[in-house]
Amino acid sequence: MNHRDSLTLVIVESSASEAEKHVATLRNAGHSIRHEHAEDLDSLTELLGSAAPDIILCGESDSLPDLDAVTGLLQEKSCQAPVIALTGDATADAVLAARRGGAMECIPYEPPLALQLAFGHCRETVMLRQQTDSLDAALQQSEARCRDLIESSRDAIAYIHEGMHIHANQSYLKMFGLDSTDEIDGTPLLNMVEHDDHRLLKDFLREYRGGNGESSTLEVRGLEPDGKHFKALMEFSPSTFDAEECIQVIIRTADNAELENQLEILTRQDILTGLANRQEFIRTVNLAIRAGFAGKQTHTVTYILIDNFKKLCESVGMSGGDKLIRNTAELLATLYGDEVTLARFGDCAFTVLWKNSNEEDAHQLAERTRQTIEEHIAEIDGHAVSMTSSIGICVINGHSRNAENVLSRADLACEVARSSGGNQIHVHSLAVDESMDGENEPEWDHVIRKTIDDERFYLAYQPVVSLNGNDGIRYEVLLRIIDEEGQVILPGQFISIAEKTDMIGEIDRWVFSTAARTLAGMDSGDGDTTFFIKTSGSTLADKEFPVWVFNTLKSHGLKTGNIIFEIPESVAVSDLKNTMLFINSIRKVGCRICLEHFGRHNQPQLLKHLNVDLVKIDGSLISNLPEKKANQEKVREIVSLAHETGKQCVAEHVHGPSDLALLWQYDIDFIQGNFVQEPSRELGYNFEEEIA
């Protein structure tokens, strides 16, 4: 979404000057708007008749129509523009009443930041609606083209719901001697099949409806118009017709069934080797996983990688590399026979699915494979080529969610073998799955070590914005990791494993040193930029960390007061001694302390015992605050206690202007959350405009 795209705003306010104030507030935040002013229902009706507003801003005063009247008029005029209600009474009850009255957002007149954020939220909704409308139009056009293709197809195609026809194309009608769709609508599919095959078709349909919904085929005898029957292959797949879920049936006769079967086989094969291709292997593993759940069977997947394949290709050329892959595929096919499903999974990678096998079986087979490849000499264009392989094994067990999950684990196990020197076998540890209940990737100690060595960490930044006009630029520093596939992984997926190793302290130091370099490189004028940086329990116990922090900041010429270390409430509760020692040491350095996720453990006495500068209220207490009376009371108590002890309060996970309206009343000092801005690698948030 382009922040500068101009939108039309209709402002219902008591005077044009009041409307202009709102416009100025929005333009100060960088929003480009065209606006119209209405001071009563008549003028609003006139505006709705001549223009289509994108957003409605509805003020509150005795001279203005109430919110129900405005939203009622919008409904009458079929206007879908979101409504922002301004109120002088932003209590939880008032906010809920406004929402029930049709307002998307309900915010107080002050601070201006509330209007800026609410407008930005509505703007995203408008843009999303426009994109959705565009996609709907494109979908309708696509469906129309598909309908035309189906009607003109030479394949006999019908759509079945609850065993009855709801539509069929001309080829289908012609196959059964019918003139129009009226003759087949509501007709049972059984009528198209020879009587002796009725039971077969009924059983198939019953099982298909209760199955996984994938494409399936059934061979039956179809009935021709003269009563003769013909061999027909019915292909069933889930579909929709006129927005109704149904089954698509394609009938192929014996004349083309063999050709279709050959084409189907080709789509599942790797062209170079003739083995199963990547897509077919993934499909087969998914089926094996489901069968394993149903029958409590165990299967294994083996991932085989030719070591130093790039160097081998340099010696025999690209065409020689293809011949080497074919030669290896033939070697493996001869070794395995029909015992397993063998596939070419990548350039020089092969995968093996062995059903009804265990870890010991798979390891023995992998060792045979490793030895066979090592002892084999391939003759490629006059060159004698010898190879080795790295092999990873993963057992399909109760923690295996899908094929991608299993193959990722087998691939990582293979990487452990390769990075350990190659020509080795590594088995994925089931203990990792069991300890993390299948939520994290295997061998995280290796993954994190390799991630650090490969510098695949990066930092994201989320602004922390003042609600009381407090100058300054503040960001929380958040860690992100990129896996070997280029996908971003959030810290929760790996940090708990890292905490059980000796590497979490190294990660904390990487985060701090990287953030310090970033801070030193910023051109912030007076240097008034503050970073909130998380710390782990291991770092709290590191007696050398505070001195290292001081030396790092000194080497970059940074002010120590611009760093705020965040300590989770859970860590403070479980290790109060080291927490207090860390706070005392880090404050001597000159840095500040924030107690984060506060409120989870109901330990208000911590604020009296810990000499922290800020308290960050846990997001579970902030999210959807207007709808949770108990949380409102708890947030007020935390803010009151924090202020009594000289501490500032930050509300995290602020998701909407309704939350903001209450937080403003509770005298919260700072807010943070995706409603303000999602975490970004860029430090481009305009604090001056938002505060203005």
Image (tube, grey):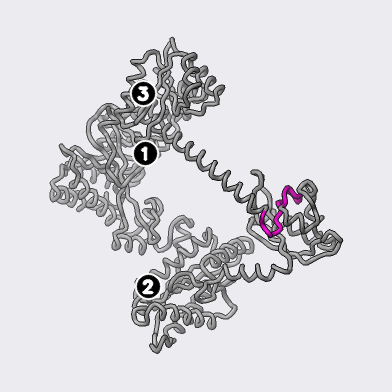
In x, y percent, where is residue 85? 44, 22
Q: Nearer the viewer, residue 143 or 101?
A: 143
In the figure, residue 476 lies in which quadrant? top left
- Residue bearing mark 2: 418
Q: Are marks 2 and 3 in contact (CB under 8 Å)?
A: no
Q: Looking at this view, name the residue that lies furthest to the top.
A: 63
Mark 3 or mark 1, earlier in chain:
1
- Residue bearing mark 3: 665
Q: Main secondary structure of the magenta part?
A: strand
Looking at the rendered image, the quarter that the C terminus falls into is: top left
Residue ID at (40%, 13%): 14
Element marked by disc 2 = helix
Q: Nearer the viewer, residue 197 or 588?
A: 197
* Residue 71 in sight in this render: yes
Residue ID at (49%, 68%): 394
- Residue bearing mark 1: 2
Tell me the kind of residue under disc 3. Gln
Q: Sort mark 1 into few (<14), some (14-19) or many (20+) by Cα contacts within 10 Å.
A: few
Magenta segment: 152-168
Residue ID at (15%, 42%): 559
Q: Sort mark 2 into few (<14), some (14-19) or many (20+) by Cα contacts within 10 Å.
A: many
Q: Is residue 353 left or right of residue 492?
A: right
Q: Are marks 3 and 1 in contact (CB under 8 Å)?
A: no
Element marked by disc 3 = helix
In x, y percent, where is residue 121? 41, 33
Residue 573's place in the image compared with 657, above or below, is below
Q: Nearer the viewer, residue 300 or 537?
A: 300
